[in-house]
Amino acid sequence: MSISGVNNQQPTINYDQVIRRIVIALLLASAVIVGFVLDVGDSKLAKFSGINSLRALRFLSRLLLLSAPVAAIVGITLGNLGLRSSKLAIDIINLLRIAQWAPFLIAWTLAFALTLEPGQRPGWLTWLWLSTYCAVAVGLRVTYEYLLVRYFDDIGGKGAIKQIMRPAITQGLFIALLLDMFVLARLWNPFLGMGVGYSVSIVLAAVTLLLNWVAGETFQSNALKWGRSAVKAFEKENFASLVGPSLIVLLCFFLWLVTAPFLFTISPSTIFDSLSALLGTHEFYNDVSVSSRELVGGMLISGSLAGIVIFLRQRFSIASRASDPLLQASQLAPIALLPNLQILSGLFTSQWSVLCVATFTFYPFLSAFTGYSRVGAAPRIALATSEALPYTCAAFVLGETWNATAGLGFMMTVAAATYDVNKGMAGFVVLMLLFAAMHITLHCLAKTMWSKNAQAVPRSETEIV
């Protein structure tokens, strides 16, 4: 005889959630083991993947683990402070849209200062520099994403942290990968028989796919979720949006000007002296021209390839399903393959940098174009191009550092190698100004085209004659 009112049902176990948490724990444990525990020289894995590959992966894992927790804490703290004022929050969002990429464009400063030989181990001071650098880069991204989600999607703190976790980890992997390729350049160089790109690219592809699976995300859902906040931010943009970020930049510049004689070895005055000297040389304009051609050529290639993928995904449902994991894996893995592609294709100088730009920008362009689904076709292209711009600049800086005879990245690398930091910083200022100008111009064009389209489309069915 059953007793009414008594619930005899046992609590069900969500096995899917348990498996996802186990995968997270395994990923974290693997990173800790590779980064801090594993002895590369005595490891049996070295016979399978190679000692150099394990060294590159150890550097990548250790740098991410040392910097990511600090970056998350600092980024979320700064985001919460910015949310105390809605005006300050939107100004910080508009500023960080461009400023968050500054660490990626100044990585040339580390190429010679911290470059290591294949068997050389970095000391504690090197790790301090690298982890601080990486933490700043990831922290700026965390602050930007956290403010974007909290301000425009009106999501609580815990929900926002959960939503930005995956892109923050991906950004950390991206900057750690670039630093790995800069600092351990000899390990990545296929001409020296030490190319590690294949092994690292396989690991990055697997990690990216697992992170997306644990988060329950696909390429499409990732792009649309990010685009929801990005479109709202774009709709609120106007010329007045530039006032707040400009004032913040001027304040930072003033503080640097005042404190430079006491805290820094370089100052704005010495940098602008070097900039004035650069502007008077033909070589500088040739460097700008070379980098501009690489930027345009690489963007045309990646944009064309992205257009083909978009057409196939929209036309055939099976293509959309089949390409989704491939697109997720293409976020970071192809970048690790670039050094090996260089020796296979025989590309040199400008062609090599064009390949770097095309590889770096394919995923961000395609993802942004997919995310801006609520915007018309022409504005979407402009906005997707603006989102891919920072990857473009980082790409030709890396490409020209590795193999070039001209370009802004080459000029800054040579300046670092010859200890002419003022000249290198002058090039960095020019690059940031060009990047900011192109980004703002593309957003203005998109805003103009979007406004015209919005006026041309009837607001309700009663307006249709």
Image (tube, rainbow, N blue to C red):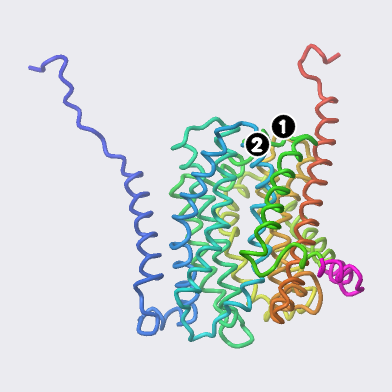
- The residue beneath circle 2 is 90
Residue 283 is inside the magenta segment: yes
* Label 2 crowd bin: few (<14), some (14–19), many (20+), radius 10 Å: many
Magenta range? 273-290
Tag 1 and tag 2, C-beta contact below 8 Å: yes
CA distance for labels 1 and 2: 9 Å
Please report the residue visible at 59 percent of the width from the left and 69 percent of the height from the top.
336
Please report the residue visible at 63 percent of the width from the left and 64 percent of the height from the top.
262
* x, y percent for residue 172: 53, 58
Please report the residue visible at 47 percent of the width from the left and 57 percent of the height from the top.
68
- The residue beneath circle 1 is 236
Q: Give above or below for 296 relative to 336.
A: above
Whether residue 309 is visible to the viewer of this picture, yes or no, is no
* x, y percent for residue 312: 70, 49
**What's under tag 2, amino acid-wise?**
Ile
Main SS of the magenta part reads helix
Number of the label disc, if any, that sits on residue 356: none
Whether residue 385 is visible to the viewer of this picture, yes or no, is yes
Residue 14 is inside the magenta segment: no
* 425 relative to 195 in the view: left or right: right
What SS does tag 1 mark? loop
Mark 1 and mark 2 lie on one chain; the one further toward the N terminus is 2
Compare residues 267 and 400 and report the one nearer the observer: 267
What SS does tag 2 mark? helix
Compare residues 378 and 84 and report the one nearer the observer: 84
Please report the residue visible at 59 percent of the width from the left and 83 percent of the height from the top.
186
**What's under tag 1, amino acid-wise?**
Lys
